[in-house]
Every structure is written in structure tokens, then in C-alpha cells.
Amino acid sequence: MSCGKRLFSFRQWVFFLLLLLTFISLVVFLMLASQTIYKFSNVRASHKKFSWMQKSNTTNLGQSIFTGKINSEIYYTAPEKNEDKKQFSTTDIDQTKVEQFLARNPSSIPQVYRKDHDAYKRYVQYLTKKEDFLPLQTKAVVLLTNYRSGSSFFGELLNQHPDVFYMFEPLIMVSPLEQCNIHVNLKKDIMKQLTQCIFPDWEAMYRGMQKSERPLYNRNIFVCTKHKFCFAPFTKELMLEDHCPHSNISDHNHDGWSDCGMVNLNLVTNTCRRKKMVAIKVIRLCDIYKLKNITEIPYMDLKVVHLIRDPRGIASSRLTLHPKLNLADAMKSTCSRQAANLDISFHEKPEWLQYKMFRYEDVALKPYHAAKSLYDFLGLKFHDSVKTWIVENTQQPIPEEFGTSYKYGMTETDKHRVRYDPWGHKRNSTSIVDKWKRTVPYPLVKRIEAVCSKMMNMVGYLPVGTIEEYKQTFSKHFFVDHESE
């Protein structure tokens, strides 16, 4: 064989290369398929967990679910002096029962407690602690808004206030995203109870619904039932030592999602009732009139905060998470609901409704003015701790009129979260207002304006001009510029 002779021909090399690529593609396909099958089997297994408890009818749904007990396996109910079992439940707690329950349900024990015996001991003591129930809460504010309207950030103005007990999206257990006509009466009942700091047994509620009408069992619903409280990490009070014993030997920063276990609803109830008011953020209650029954509670002082956002900004935010979504149709539905609620608030003005509307754009550009306007409406003081939180999450220093200026520079980690975390609370708030002009194509902008024109006119959002003007106006705000009243 001559030294210049090639080992393989060109065609053979191409054949081997194609064979290798086919093999790699097959391996990738099998990996993805196995992951899909695993997730599907988990979802089915999760549904099977509830199927044996499924009831044939839902006539009594909503009854006996507002018990005030942490878990029926842990507590037994003593004779009650108060006949209203939905409001008060006197419980005697046995530490042995708590430990037996945790032994049968190891997923209820945060991983950090498995390494820290002292933290685990404090966790058990927390679950066994009992207090007499305080009087019902009589002040509430409902933050009524829509999906991807900046409500997570705005809601933190309530969550960070020391006089407020905040709840994030409790209706997730009974309603898929923005589906207004499902379990309407149950939603009303839940809201009526939560405004008084009466918490339901979420698992009993979920399994009591017809299987075809339940939201798909997913991680969020699993966490709600596991913690006995929906989105507990978004309630600041529940992340403190009083409700989440912290480990002293953890090798990472405290994370409420993984490092906190289920809550003691007896203690949570009293924490909620000690506050000056309770605040509840909802995107799954679409008609403002569905809140009227709350005002029928004796001595209840209900206020409604309505958060509006430019529909083009909502579309941009949704497009990031759902690239294949039919945005024009979705925004038509969203804008129709917004316009209907604005009509009620601006024109009908029912006597029961204490109402204030905020535009997300005003909140983003002037967060301190918006916060002061919010707290004035609610009768709350603008605390320095909230001002500090705004500085650290918006990059905007405190104006002199609101006290000592405090400057803050975002770390590289913070900047990464601003760019890539659609669920986070840190925002470069001035740039986020105009982001839609860089992400939403001009034809889609015009279709959204066509289906949302009534709502946009009512709150001062301006249409764009020609495509040439649209390309040249990235520094222009397309809304009437005014300070929050």
C-alpha cells in the first residue's frame, strides 16, 4: 500500500458522518421521550392520588373546608362552643401525631431539616403549637388585575408593608388561568373567607371538584396542598422564623420554596388577623361585581385596587412565555374584561365599591408616588422599609420629597435576573415600560389596538402612527403622562 493512498473514500466519510448524526439524533430523541413519559406518568400518578377520594357530586363543595386545622391527620377537634364550624375550631395537638404524620409523609419535611436536627425539632414544635383564635379580620384590599400586568411587582408594595398580610393568587386551586366562568360561586366563597383570615383545606377542596373541572394537577397545586397555603414564599410573614424555622447549617441562602415546610394554619390565621389588613392578589376573578358579597360581612371594610397595563405591554410579556399564543384573540378577551370593570367603576359607581385604579406604567416610572398614593388610599403609612425595597428592586433612588436618598447599584446577579427571570420582582422599571416597542411587530400592535381601543381610550393609552413613525419613536411613551392621583 502506498503511503499516499487514503484509508477511506470521500463517500465513505460522508456515509460514516451521516450514520453518526443519525445515532446522536436517536439518542437525543429517546432521552426527550423518556422525560416526557416520566412527567406524564407523574401527572397521572398525582391524579390517582386524589381519585380514590373523588366524590360523585359537588353539592356540598365549600362546606366543611374552612376548618382552621393544619391537617386532619395531625389534629383532632375538641367540642366547640361556637356553632359556626367554618370560623373557629379548637384543637388539641399531640406531638406524637405530628411526628407520625411526618414519618408517613417525608415530602413534608424540607431537605435542610434532615441534616439539621435542631431545625427539625423547632419545625415539629412549630406544628404542635396552639393559640386561641383571634377575632376575624375586618379590613381587606383586593388587587384585581390580569395575567402579566406587572401585578407581581405591584403586589410587593402590599407584601412588603409591615401592617399587611399578603396572599398571592389563592384562586389557582380552583380555576385555570383567567377562566372566568368556572366555579364562580366557589371563588366568591373563598374570597369572602380569606378576607376574614379563614383558610380552607385546599386538598379537600381540590378533590371535591369534578375531575373534568379541576385545574390540571401540577407543581403549583402540589405545593399548595403540601404547604397548606398557596404560594407561601410570596407571603413575607411566612418566610420569617416564626413560621419557617431556619437551619443554621444550610450550605445555601435561605430559599422559601425548598427550605420551608407546611404551615401551622392556627398560627397563620392569628398572624393574618393581627395585621391592620389583609391583601389578596387575583387574576382569576374577572368581574368586579363578584366582590360585592364580601361587603355584606358585618363590619367588613373592603377596598379594591384595579391594576391596568398597556395591552401591548401585556402582549410583549406573554409573548416571551408563550411564543405560539394567538395574542390578538387573547388580548381581545383581556381588554373586554378590563373595559367592563372600568365601566362599572367610572360610570356606575356602586355605593359598595371603594375603588382606585393604577396604571402599571405610572407605577414603573414613579414607584414612590404610586406607593404613596396606594397607602393613602388604604390608610397606611409609607414605611422606610418599603422605600428601601423599592430602591433595591427598581434602581430608582428615593426622591428628596420622600426622605433621605438611598442609592443602590444592582449586582451582576440582579441584572441577570432582570433580563431572564419573567417571574422575578427586580425590574429596571423605566425600561420595562417601553419594551413592547422592541418585541411586538407593528402589524400585531395594530391588531391589538383595534380590539382594545375602548379600554385604551378609557385610561389614556395612545395608538401608534405609521410603521415609519413606530420605528423612530422608541423613546416616546404611548400613553397620557400623568402622576398617580
Image (cartoon, rainbow, N blue to C red):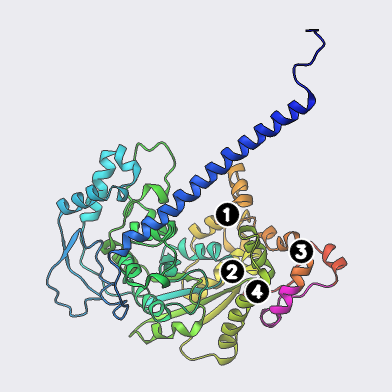
Front tag of 2 and 4: 4
Q: Give the quadrant of the C terminus.
A: bottom right
**Mark 1 or mark 4, earlier in chain:** 4
Image quadrant of residue 193?
Answer: bottom left
Give the x, y percent position of residue 463.
77, 75
Kind of residue sitting beneath label 1: Lys
Marking on residue 370: 2
CB within 8 Å, label 3 to label 4? no
As helix, strand or loop, the secondary structure at mark 1 comes to: loop
Which of pointers 1 and 3 lies earlier in the amino acid sequence?
A: 1
Q: Give how far apart the Cα atoms at labels 3 and 2 are.
A: 30 Å
Q: Position of residue 282 (x, y in %)?
A: 48, 71
Say few, some or many: other residues with alpha carbon within 10 Å of mark 1 (under 14 / 14 to 19 / 20 or more): many
- State how far apart marks 2 and 4 are (Cα): 31 Å
Image depth: mark 2 or mark 1 in front: 1
Which residue sits at x=65%, y=62%?
324
Q: Residue at x 69, y 74 (%)?
A: 482
The reply to whether residue 485 is visible in this rendering is: no
Is 93 or 132 nearer to us in this picture? Answer: 93
Q: Is residue 165 magenta?
A: no
Label 3 belongs to which residue?
441
Left or right of 39: which side holds 89? left
- Category of crowding for the residue at label 2, using alpha-carbon neighbours closer than 10 angstroms: few (below 14), some (14–19), many (at least 20): many
**Foreground: disc 1 or disc 3:** 3
- Principal SS element in the magenta part? helix
- The amino acid marked with disc number 3 is Pro
Q: Residue at x 48, y 57 (%)?
A: 385
Q: Which residues are magenta?
A: 447-465
Separation of disc 1 and disc 4 at Cα?
A: 30 Å
Provide the secondary structure element on which disc 3 rests.
loop
Q: Which residue is mark 1?
A: 426
Where on the picture, by quarter, is residue 400? Answer: bottom right
